[in-house]
Image (tube, grey):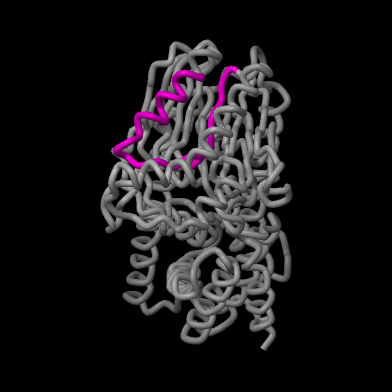
Amino acid sequence: MRSWLWLLAGTALLPFTFLQTTIPLAAWVAPVLLLRFTRTTRARWALPALAVAVAVGAAISFRGAFPGDRIAILAAGAGVLGVVPYALDGLLGRRLSGLPRTLVFPAADVAVGFLFSTGDMGTMGHQAGTQVGNLPLLQSVSVTGLWGLAFLMAWTAPVCNELWERGFALRAAGRSAVIWVCSLAAVLLLGGARLAFDPPTGSTVRVAALAPNRAADDAAAAARIKAGPRSAAERAELRRRYYAPALDDLLDRTVTAARSGARIVTWSEAAVFDFVEDGAAVVAQAQAVARAERIYLQIGVVYRLPRERSPNVEIRAIMIDPAGAVVWNYLKTSTPLSDGNVPGPGVVPTIDTPYGRLATAICFDANFMPLIRQAGQAGADILLLPSSDWAQVTDALAQQAVLRGVENGMSVVRPARRGTSMAVDHQGRMIGYEASWFTGDARTTDHTMTVTVPIHGRPTPYSQWVGDAVAWLCLTGLLAMTVAAAIRRFRRTATAEPDRATEPALSAG
Protein backbone atom coordinates (compact mmCIF):
# COMPACT_ATOMS: atom_id res chain seq x y z
CA MET A 1 0.00 0.00 0.00
CA ARG A 2 2.84 2.36 0.81
CA SER A 3 4.15 2.12 -2.75
CA TRP A 4 0.94 3.71 -4.03
CA LEU A 5 1.70 6.74 -1.89
CA TRP A 6 4.87 7.21 -3.94
CA LEU A 7 2.75 7.16 -7.08
CA LEU A 8 0.42 9.81 -5.67
CA ALA A 9 3.32 12.01 -4.57
CA GLY A 10 5.09 11.68 -7.91
CA THR A 11 1.89 12.36 -9.82
CA ALA A 12 1.31 15.51 -7.78
CA LEU A 13 4.71 16.80 -8.90
CA LEU A 14 4.39 15.89 -12.59
CA PRO A 15 2.37 18.96 -13.67
CA PHE A 16 5.23 21.15 -12.45
CA THR A 17 7.91 19.41 -14.52
CA PHE A 18 7.23 20.79 -17.99
CA LEU A 19 5.45 23.34 -20.18
CA GLN A 20 3.91 25.79 -17.66
CA THR A 21 4.11 26.56 -13.93
CA THR A 22 7.38 24.65 -13.67
CA ILE A 23 9.31 24.03 -10.45
CA PRO A 24 12.94 23.10 -11.21
CA LEU A 25 13.34 20.68 -8.29
CA ALA A 26 10.15 18.82 -9.21
CA ALA A 27 11.77 17.61 -12.43
CA TRP A 28 14.42 15.82 -10.33
CA VAL A 29 12.18 14.48 -7.55
CA ALA A 30 9.13 13.22 -9.47
CA PRO A 31 11.03 10.42 -11.31
CA VAL A 32 12.57 9.28 -8.01
CA LEU A 33 9.13 8.72 -6.51
CA LEU A 34 7.61 7.18 -9.62
CA LEU A 35 10.53 4.78 -10.06
CA ARG A 36 10.14 3.80 -6.43
CA PHE A 37 6.54 2.93 -7.19
CA THR A 38 7.33 0.80 -10.25
CA ARG A 39 10.13 -1.05 -8.46
CA THR A 40 7.90 -1.99 -5.53
CA THR A 41 4.71 -2.88 -7.40
CA ARG A 42 3.98 -5.71 -9.82
CA ALA A 43 4.44 -4.55 -13.39
CA ARG A 44 0.94 -5.55 -14.50
CA TRP A 45 -0.45 -3.00 -12.03
CA ALA A 46 2.38 -0.48 -11.94
CA LEU A 47 2.75 0.31 -15.65
CA PRO A 48 -0.93 0.99 -16.46
CA ALA A 49 -1.26 3.07 -13.30
CA LEU A 50 1.87 5.01 -14.20
CA ALA A 51 0.62 5.62 -17.75
CA VAL A 52 -2.56 7.12 -16.33
CA ALA A 53 -0.56 9.23 -13.87
CA VAL A 54 1.70 10.62 -16.61
CA ALA A 55 -1.31 11.33 -18.82
CA VAL A 56 -3.02 13.19 -15.99
CA GLY A 57 0.10 15.22 -15.27
CA ALA A 58 0.47 16.06 -18.96
CA ALA A 59 -3.19 17.07 -19.26
CA ILE A 60 -2.81 19.47 -16.34
CA SER A 61 0.37 20.92 -17.87
CA PHE A 62 -1.41 21.38 -21.21
CA ARG A 63 -4.37 23.19 -19.62
CA GLY A 64 -5.57 26.08 -21.71
CA ALA A 65 -2.80 25.61 -24.25
CA PHE A 66 -4.77 23.45 -26.68
CA PRO A 67 -8.40 22.49 -27.35
CA GLY A 68 -9.77 19.76 -25.10
CA ASP A 69 -9.69 16.99 -27.72
CA ARG A 70 -6.11 17.86 -28.62
CA ILE A 71 -5.12 17.77 -24.94
CA ALA A 72 -6.63 14.29 -24.61
CA ILE A 73 -4.60 13.01 -27.57
CA LEU A 74 -1.35 14.63 -26.42
CA ALA A 75 -1.84 13.46 -22.82
CA ALA A 76 -2.50 9.88 -23.95
CA GLY A 77 0.66 9.94 -26.05
CA ALA A 78 2.64 11.32 -23.12
CA GLY A 79 1.31 8.52 -20.94
CA VAL A 80 2.45 5.82 -23.37
CA LEU A 81 5.90 7.32 -23.96
CA GLY A 82 6.39 8.24 -20.33
CA VAL A 83 6.10 4.61 -19.22
CA VAL A 84 8.88 3.35 -21.50
CA PRO A 85 11.92 4.21 -19.30
CA TYR A 86 10.22 2.69 -16.23
CA ALA A 87 9.25 -0.46 -18.15
CA LEU A 88 12.81 -0.91 -19.44
CA ASP A 89 14.20 -0.33 -15.95
CA GLY A 90 12.03 -3.19 -14.72
CA LEU A 91 12.77 -5.44 -17.69
CA LEU A 92 16.52 -4.88 -17.97
CA GLY A 93 17.56 -3.34 -14.68
CA ARG A 94 16.53 -6.31 -12.59
CA ARG A 95 18.89 -8.50 -14.62
CA LEU A 96 21.80 -6.16 -14.00
CA SER A 97 23.46 -4.98 -10.84
CA GLY A 98 25.60 -2.16 -9.53
CA LEU A 99 26.35 0.80 -11.76
CA PRO A 100 24.93 -0.74 -14.99
CA ARG A 101 21.56 -1.16 -13.31
CA THR A 102 21.38 2.58 -12.63
CA LEU A 103 22.13 3.45 -16.26
CA VAL A 104 19.13 1.76 -17.85
CA PHE A 105 16.58 4.36 -16.78
CA PRO A 106 18.50 7.50 -17.84
CA ALA A 107 19.60 5.91 -21.11
CA ALA A 108 16.01 5.00 -21.89
CA ASP A 109 14.76 8.44 -20.86
CA VAL A 110 17.23 10.18 -23.17
CA ALA A 111 16.55 7.72 -26.00
CA VAL A 112 12.80 8.33 -25.81
CA GLY A 113 13.27 12.10 -25.66
CA PHE A 114 15.69 12.02 -28.58
CA LEU A 115 13.40 9.94 -30.79
CA PHE A 116 10.44 12.16 -29.86
CA SER A 117 12.47 15.26 -30.75
CA THR A 118 12.71 14.09 -34.36
CA GLY A 119 8.95 14.53 -34.69
CA ASP A 120 6.77 17.59 -35.18
CA MET A 121 7.13 18.90 -31.60
CA GLY A 122 10.91 18.75 -31.28
CA THR A 123 12.09 19.32 -27.72
CA MET A 124 9.14 21.51 -26.74
CA GLY A 125 8.41 21.15 -23.04
CA HIS A 126 11.41 18.92 -22.31
CA GLN A 127 12.11 18.80 -18.59
CA ALA A 128 15.68 20.00 -19.08
CA GLY A 129 14.23 23.40 -19.90
CA THR A 130 13.18 23.82 -16.28
CA GLN A 131 16.86 24.13 -15.32
CA VAL A 132 17.72 27.25 -17.35
CA GLY A 133 17.87 29.31 -14.15
CA ASN A 134 20.71 27.18 -12.75
CA LEU A 135 23.57 28.74 -14.71
CA PRO A 136 26.42 26.46 -13.53
CA LEU A 137 24.35 23.37 -14.41
CA LEU A 138 23.21 24.93 -17.67
CA GLN A 139 26.77 25.23 -19.00
CA SER A 140 26.85 21.45 -19.49
CA VAL A 141 24.66 21.78 -22.58
CA SER A 142 27.46 23.66 -24.34
CA VAL A 143 29.30 20.32 -24.39
CA THR A 144 26.64 17.63 -24.52
CA GLY A 145 23.58 19.49 -25.72
CA LEU A 146 20.31 19.04 -23.90
CA TRP A 147 20.89 15.27 -23.72
CA GLY A 148 23.73 15.35 -21.20
CA LEU A 149 21.68 17.42 -18.79
CA ALA A 150 18.65 15.18 -19.36
CA PHE A 151 20.76 12.10 -18.59
CA LEU A 152 22.08 13.58 -15.36
CA MET A 153 18.58 14.51 -14.21
CA ALA A 154 17.13 11.09 -15.03
CA TRP A 155 20.12 9.26 -13.51
CA THR A 156 19.15 10.71 -10.14
CA ALA A 157 16.09 8.44 -9.91
CA PRO A 158 17.79 5.01 -10.05
CA VAL A 159 20.73 6.15 -7.91
CA CYS A 160 18.37 7.35 -5.18
CA ASN A 161 16.38 4.15 -5.47
CA GLU A 162 19.53 2.04 -5.15
CA LEU A 163 20.20 3.81 -1.87
CA TRP A 164 16.56 3.55 -0.84
CA GLU A 165 16.43 -0.18 -1.50
CA ARG A 166 19.42 -0.71 0.77
CA GLY A 167 18.21 1.39 3.63
CA PHE A 168 20.51 4.23 2.56
CA ALA A 169 23.55 2.14 3.42
CA LEU A 170 26.29 3.81 1.40
CA ARG A 171 28.57 0.79 1.60
CA ALA A 172 26.01 -1.39 -0.15
CA ALA A 173 25.22 1.01 -2.98
CA GLY A 174 28.18 3.33 -2.63
CA ARG A 175 29.85 3.09 -6.02
CA SER A 176 26.82 4.21 -8.01
CA ALA A 177 26.06 7.00 -5.56
CA VAL A 178 29.67 8.20 -5.47
CA ILE A 179 29.93 8.28 -9.27
CA TRP A 180 26.66 10.19 -9.55
CA VAL A 181 27.69 12.71 -6.87
CA CYS A 182 31.09 13.19 -8.50
CA SER A 183 29.47 13.67 -11.91
CA LEU A 184 27.04 16.27 -10.60
CA ALA A 185 29.78 18.03 -8.65
CA ALA A 186 32.04 18.11 -11.71
CA VAL A 187 29.26 19.58 -13.87
CA LEU A 188 28.51 22.28 -11.29
CA LEU A 189 32.18 23.03 -10.63
CA LEU A 190 33.16 23.28 -14.29
CA GLY A 191 30.03 25.24 -15.12
CA GLY A 192 30.75 27.67 -12.30
CA ALA A 193 34.33 28.02 -13.49
CA ARG A 194 33.15 28.82 -17.02
CA LEU A 195 30.89 31.52 -15.70
CA ALA A 196 33.58 32.97 -13.45
CA PHE A 197 36.61 32.83 -15.73
CA ASP A 198 35.13 33.18 -19.23
CA PRO A 199 32.30 35.71 -19.00
CA PRO A 200 31.22 37.74 -22.04
CA THR A 201 33.78 40.44 -22.72
CA GLY A 202 34.51 43.00 -25.39
CA SER A 203 32.21 45.10 -27.48
CA THR A 204 28.44 45.14 -27.31
CA VAL A 205 25.61 46.28 -29.54
CA ARG A 206 22.29 47.86 -28.69
CA VAL A 207 19.39 45.77 -30.00
CA ALA A 208 15.73 46.76 -29.99
CA ALA A 209 13.16 43.94 -30.06
CA LEU A 210 9.67 45.07 -31.05
CA ALA A 211 6.32 43.34 -30.75
CA PRO A 212 3.29 44.92 -32.44
CA ASN A 213 0.90 47.28 -30.72
CA ARG A 214 -1.53 45.06 -28.84
CA ALA A 215 -4.62 47.11 -29.60
CA ALA A 216 -3.91 47.03 -33.34
CA ASP A 217 -3.06 43.34 -33.20
CA ASP A 218 -6.26 42.55 -31.29
CA ALA A 219 -8.33 44.53 -33.77
CA ALA A 220 -6.91 42.60 -36.71
CA ALA A 221 -7.47 39.29 -34.92
CA ALA A 222 -11.06 40.24 -34.04
CA ALA A 223 -11.81 40.90 -37.71
CA ARG A 224 -11.35 37.14 -38.38
CA ILE A 225 -10.24 37.68 -41.96
CA LYS A 226 -10.90 34.42 -43.77
CA ALA A 227 -8.39 32.76 -46.03
CA GLY A 228 -8.97 32.77 -49.76
CA PRO A 229 -8.46 34.78 -52.95
CA ARG A 230 -9.46 38.47 -53.06
CA SER A 231 -9.53 41.29 -55.54
CA ALA A 232 -6.98 44.09 -55.38
CA ALA A 233 -9.64 46.46 -54.06
CA GLU A 234 -10.64 44.06 -51.27
CA ARG A 235 -7.02 43.57 -50.26
CA ALA A 236 -6.40 47.32 -50.19
CA GLU A 237 -9.39 47.94 -47.95
CA LEU A 238 -8.49 45.16 -45.51
CA ARG A 239 -4.90 46.37 -45.38
CA ARG A 240 -5.97 49.95 -44.70
CA ARG A 241 -8.37 48.99 -41.93
CA TYR A 242 -6.55 46.18 -40.15
CA TYR A 243 -2.92 45.82 -41.22
CA ALA A 244 -1.64 49.36 -41.78
CA PRO A 245 -2.07 50.56 -38.15
CA ALA A 246 0.30 47.90 -36.80
CA LEU A 247 2.81 48.48 -39.61
CA ASP A 248 2.82 52.26 -39.19
CA ASP A 249 3.31 51.93 -35.44
CA LEU A 250 6.22 49.49 -35.86
CA LEU A 251 7.96 51.70 -38.40
CA ASP A 252 7.62 54.73 -36.09
CA ARG A 253 8.97 52.77 -33.12
CA THR A 254 11.81 51.45 -35.26
CA VAL A 255 12.87 55.01 -36.04
CA THR A 256 12.64 55.92 -32.35
CA ALA A 257 14.75 52.90 -31.34
CA ALA A 258 17.38 53.68 -33.98
CA ARG A 259 17.65 57.29 -32.87
CA SER A 260 18.03 56.07 -29.30
CA GLY A 261 21.12 54.09 -30.27
CA ALA A 262 19.87 50.70 -31.49
CA ARG A 263 22.00 49.38 -34.36
CA ILE A 264 19.92 46.24 -34.79
CA VAL A 265 16.13 46.28 -34.67
CA THR A 266 14.16 43.05 -34.89
CA TRP A 267 10.40 42.66 -34.96
CA SER A 268 8.53 39.70 -33.55
CA GLU A 269 7.08 36.90 -35.60
CA ALA A 270 3.78 37.95 -37.22
CA ALA A 271 4.44 41.58 -36.31
CA VAL A 272 2.58 42.58 -39.47
CA PHE A 273 0.27 40.81 -41.90
CA ASP A 274 -0.21 41.37 -45.60
CA PHE A 275 -1.29 39.60 -48.76
CA VAL A 276 1.43 37.86 -50.73
CA GLU A 277 0.36 39.61 -53.95
CA ASP A 278 1.19 42.98 -52.36
CA GLY A 279 4.04 41.90 -50.08
CA ALA A 280 6.71 44.04 -51.72
CA ALA A 281 5.14 47.19 -50.31
CA VAL A 282 5.86 46.24 -46.68
CA VAL A 283 9.46 45.40 -47.52
CA ALA A 284 9.92 48.66 -49.42
CA GLN A 285 8.75 50.72 -46.44
CA ALA A 286 11.08 48.83 -44.12
CA GLN A 287 13.97 49.26 -46.56
CA ALA A 288 13.45 53.01 -46.55
CA VAL A 289 13.64 53.13 -42.75
CA ALA A 290 16.72 50.87 -42.56
CA ARG A 291 18.49 52.97 -45.19
CA ALA A 292 17.59 56.28 -43.58
CA GLU A 293 18.57 55.21 -40.06
CA ARG A 294 21.59 53.09 -41.10
CA ILE A 295 20.47 50.04 -39.10
CA TYR A 296 20.05 46.33 -39.55
CA LEU A 297 16.30 45.82 -39.52
CA GLN A 298 14.62 42.41 -39.42
CA ILE A 299 10.87 42.48 -39.98
CA GLY A 300 8.42 39.69 -39.18
CA VAL A 301 5.68 39.28 -41.77
CA VAL A 302 2.86 36.81 -42.31
CA TYR A 303 1.80 36.72 -45.95
CA ARG A 304 -1.69 35.43 -46.66
CA LEU A 305 -1.83 33.20 -49.72
CA PRO A 306 -4.80 33.28 -52.12
CA ARG A 307 -6.16 29.90 -51.14
CA GLU A 308 -8.56 28.63 -48.51
CA ARG A 309 -7.00 25.30 -47.59
CA SER A 310 -4.00 25.02 -45.31
CA PRO A 311 -1.17 25.72 -45.74
CA ASN A 312 -2.31 29.19 -46.66
CA VAL A 313 0.25 31.52 -45.09
CA GLU A 314 3.98 32.16 -45.32
CA ILE A 315 5.70 33.19 -42.09
CA ARG A 316 8.86 35.14 -42.86
CA ALA A 317 11.72 36.99 -41.18
CA ILE A 318 13.27 39.46 -43.62
CA MET A 319 16.62 41.09 -42.82
CA ILE A 320 17.51 44.45 -44.37
CA ASP A 321 20.99 45.94 -44.06
CA PRO A 322 21.90 49.63 -43.57
CA ALA A 323 22.13 50.09 -47.34
CA GLY A 324 18.52 48.98 -47.67
CA ALA A 325 19.33 45.63 -49.29
CA VAL A 326 17.48 42.44 -48.33
CA VAL A 327 20.16 40.05 -47.09
CA TRP A 328 17.85 37.19 -46.15
CA ASN A 329 14.21 36.29 -46.50
CA TYR A 330 13.78 33.35 -44.13
CA LEU A 331 10.71 31.15 -44.36
CA LYS A 332 9.75 29.47 -41.09
CA THR A 333 10.84 25.83 -41.11
CA SER A 334 8.59 24.28 -38.48
CA THR A 335 4.84 23.83 -38.78
CA PRO A 336 3.27 24.12 -35.32
CA LEU A 337 -0.18 22.77 -34.59
CA SER A 338 -2.30 25.69 -35.78
CA ASP A 339 -0.12 28.03 -37.83
CA GLY A 340 -1.12 26.61 -41.22
CA ASN A 341 2.15 27.79 -42.74
CA VAL A 342 4.12 26.65 -45.75
CA PRO A 343 7.32 25.03 -44.35
CA GLY A 344 10.64 26.49 -45.38
CA PRO A 345 13.70 24.57 -46.63
CA GLY A 346 15.30 24.39 -43.18
CA VAL A 347 18.43 26.44 -43.89
CA VAL A 348 19.39 28.96 -41.19
CA PRO A 349 20.87 32.12 -42.74
CA THR A 350 23.80 34.08 -41.34
CA ILE A 351 25.43 37.42 -42.15
CA ASP A 352 28.64 39.08 -41.00
CA THR A 353 28.15 42.57 -39.62
CA PRO A 354 30.19 45.06 -37.57
CA TYR A 355 28.16 43.72 -34.63
CA GLY A 356 29.07 40.07 -34.99
CA ARG A 357 27.70 37.28 -37.12
CA LEU A 358 23.91 37.31 -37.03
CA ALA A 359 21.56 34.39 -37.65
CA THR A 360 17.82 33.90 -37.49
CA ALA A 361 15.08 31.32 -37.04
CA ILE A 362 11.43 31.75 -36.08
CA CYS A 363 9.79 30.81 -32.77
CA PHE A 364 8.94 27.09 -32.82
CA ASP A 365 12.07 26.43 -34.91
CA ALA A 366 14.05 26.69 -31.67
CA ASN A 367 12.61 23.35 -30.56
CA PHE A 368 14.68 21.59 -33.21
CA MET A 369 18.27 21.17 -32.12
CA PRO A 370 19.83 20.22 -35.49
CA LEU A 371 18.23 23.23 -37.17
CA ILE A 372 19.58 25.76 -34.67
CA ARG A 373 22.92 23.95 -34.58
CA GLN A 374 23.43 25.20 -38.14
CA ALA A 375 23.89 28.67 -36.66
CA GLY A 376 26.36 27.32 -34.09
CA GLN A 377 28.36 25.50 -36.75
CA ALA A 378 28.47 28.71 -38.78
CA GLY A 379 29.90 30.57 -35.77
CA ALA A 380 26.92 32.85 -35.20
CA ASP A 381 27.31 35.34 -32.36
CA ILE A 382 23.69 36.50 -32.06
CA LEU A 383 20.54 34.58 -32.91
CA LEU A 384 17.51 36.73 -33.66
CA LEU A 385 14.48 34.60 -32.83
CA PRO A 386 11.22 36.42 -33.62
CA SER A 387 8.33 34.62 -31.94
CA SER A 388 4.57 34.63 -31.52
CA ASP A 389 3.26 32.73 -28.51
CA TRP A 390 0.30 32.40 -26.26
CA ALA A 391 0.43 32.71 -22.49
CA GLN A 392 0.40 29.01 -21.64
CA VAL A 393 3.48 28.13 -23.71
CA THR A 394 5.56 31.30 -23.81
CA ASP A 395 7.82 30.27 -20.91
CA ALA A 396 8.36 26.75 -22.26
CA LEU A 397 9.32 28.07 -25.69
CA ALA A 398 11.63 30.65 -24.13
CA GLN A 399 13.33 27.91 -22.09
CA GLN A 400 14.15 25.98 -25.23
CA ALA A 401 15.50 29.15 -26.84
CA VAL A 402 17.87 29.61 -23.89
CA LEU A 403 19.08 26.01 -24.23
CA ARG A 404 19.76 26.51 -27.95
CA GLY A 405 21.76 29.66 -27.24
CA VAL A 406 24.01 28.02 -24.64
CA GLU A 407 24.38 24.86 -26.73
CA ASN A 408 25.67 26.89 -29.64
CA GLY A 409 27.57 29.64 -27.82
CA MET A 410 25.47 32.56 -29.07
CA SER A 411 23.30 35.25 -27.55
CA VAL A 412 19.59 35.02 -28.27
CA VAL A 413 17.21 37.95 -28.73
CA ARG A 414 13.60 36.77 -28.77
CA PRO A 415 10.90 39.41 -29.38
CA ALA A 416 7.50 37.83 -28.77
CA ARG A 417 4.06 38.82 -29.97
CA ARG A 418 1.42 37.57 -27.53
CA GLY A 419 4.17 36.35 -25.24
CA THR A 420 7.17 37.23 -23.12
CA SER A 421 10.13 38.78 -24.91
CA MET A 422 13.57 37.95 -23.55
CA ALA A 423 17.27 38.06 -24.35
CA VAL A 424 20.18 36.03 -22.97
CA ASP A 425 23.91 36.01 -23.56
CA HIS A 426 25.76 32.93 -24.81
CA GLN A 427 26.04 31.54 -21.25
CA GLY A 428 22.35 31.90 -20.52
CA ARG A 429 22.44 35.08 -18.40
CA MET A 430 19.20 37.01 -18.71
CA ILE A 431 19.95 40.41 -20.21
CA GLY A 432 16.41 41.38 -21.17
CA TYR A 433 12.87 40.48 -20.14
CA GLU A 434 9.66 42.14 -21.26
CA ALA A 435 6.25 40.74 -20.25
CA SER A 436 4.06 43.79 -20.82
CA TRP A 437 1.86 41.97 -23.33
CA PHE A 438 0.10 40.40 -20.37
CA THR A 439 0.33 43.28 -17.90
CA GLY A 440 0.28 46.58 -19.77
CA ASP A 441 -2.54 48.69 -21.15
CA ALA A 442 -3.26 47.53 -24.72
CA ARG A 443 -3.78 51.10 -25.88
CA THR A 444 -0.67 52.74 -24.48
CA THR A 445 1.97 50.09 -23.72
CA ASP A 446 5.02 50.14 -25.98
CA HIS A 447 6.01 46.51 -26.39
CA THR A 448 9.70 47.25 -26.94
CA MET A 449 12.62 45.51 -25.28
CA THR A 450 15.98 47.22 -25.66
CA VAL A 451 19.07 45.25 -24.65
CA THR A 452 22.83 45.51 -24.81
CA VAL A 453 24.17 42.30 -26.34
CA PRO A 454 27.78 41.02 -26.53
CA ILE A 455 28.84 40.88 -30.17
CA HIS A 456 31.15 37.90 -29.66
CA GLY A 457 29.86 34.41 -28.90
CA ARG A 458 31.90 31.29 -28.18
CA PRO A 459 32.19 28.18 -30.37
CA THR A 460 31.10 25.21 -28.27
CA PRO A 461 31.98 21.50 -28.34
CA TYR A 462 28.31 20.72 -28.91
CA SER A 463 27.99 22.95 -31.97
CA GLN A 464 31.32 22.06 -33.54
CA TRP A 465 31.68 18.32 -33.09
CA VAL A 466 29.63 16.62 -30.34
CA GLY A 467 26.13 17.22 -31.68
CA ASP A 468 23.70 14.46 -30.69
CA ALA A 469 26.46 11.99 -29.81
CA VAL A 470 25.21 11.65 -26.21
CA ALA A 471 21.75 10.68 -27.41
CA TRP A 472 23.17 8.14 -29.85
CA LEU A 473 25.41 6.79 -27.10
CA CYS A 474 22.35 6.27 -24.91
CA LEU A 475 20.59 4.40 -27.70
CA THR A 476 23.65 2.24 -28.29
CA GLY A 477 24.16 1.68 -24.57
CA LEU A 478 20.55 0.66 -24.16
CA LEU A 479 20.95 -1.91 -26.90
CA ALA A 480 24.17 -3.19 -25.30
CA MET A 481 22.50 -3.52 -21.91
CA THR A 482 19.63 -5.41 -23.53
CA VAL A 483 22.10 -7.88 -25.02
CA ALA A 484 24.01 -8.15 -21.73
CA ALA A 485 20.82 -8.84 -19.78
CA ALA A 486 19.75 -11.48 -22.30
CA ILE A 487 23.15 -13.21 -22.15
CA ARG A 488 23.11 -13.19 -18.37
CA ARG A 489 19.64 -14.69 -18.29
CA PHE A 490 20.64 -17.36 -20.81
CA ARG A 491 23.72 -18.34 -18.81
CA ARG A 492 21.85 -18.59 -15.55
CA THR A 493 19.09 -20.59 -17.16
CA ALA A 494 21.64 -22.93 -18.73
CA THR A 495 23.36 -23.54 -15.40
CA ALA A 496 20.07 -23.68 -13.48
CA GLU A 497 21.53 -21.08 -11.13
CA PRO A 498 18.96 -18.77 -9.53
CA ASP A 499 19.15 -15.22 -10.83
CA ARG A 500 19.54 -13.30 -7.61
CA ALA A 501 19.42 -9.98 -9.42
CA THR A 502 15.76 -10.66 -10.20
CA GLU A 503 14.85 -11.04 -6.50
CA PRO A 504 13.41 -7.95 -4.83
CA ALA A 505 16.10 -6.24 -2.83
CA LEU A 506 13.83 -4.79 -0.17
CA SER A 507 10.38 -4.38 1.16
CA ALA A 508 7.84 -2.21 -0.58
CA GLY A 509 8.42 0.60 1.88
Q: Which region is colored magenta?
A: 263-289
Q: Which residue is drawn at the image coordinates 38% and 47% (left, top)? A: 334
Where's residue 301, x and y in %?
43, 38
Q: Which residue is drawn at the image coordinates 59% and 17% (left, top)? A: 263
Residue 277 is covered by the magenta coloring:
yes
Q: How many marks?
A: 0
Residue 192 is covered by the magenta coloring:
no
Where's residue 282, x and y in %?
42, 31
Where's residue 390, x and y in %?
57, 55
* Horizontal side, residue 163 vs residue 108: left or right: right
Q: Quadrant of the N terminus?
A: bottom right
| Vertical side of 31 occupied by 236: above or below | above
- Whether residue 139 is visible, yes or no, is yes
| Vertical side of 264 occupied by 156: above or below | below
Q: Which residue is drawn at the image coordinates 31% and 45% (left, top)? A: 343
Q: Quadrant of residue 193?
A: top right
Where's residue 175, x and y in %?
63, 53
The residue nearer to you, when weighing 120 against 40, is 120
The residue nearer to you, when weighing 433 against 58, is 433
| Vertical side of 36 occupied by 202: above or below | above
- Whether residue 95 is visible, yes or no, is no
The residue nearer to you, when weighing 43 against 110, is 110
Q: Quadrant of the C terminus?
A: bottom right
| Vertical side of 488 occupied by 7: above or below | below
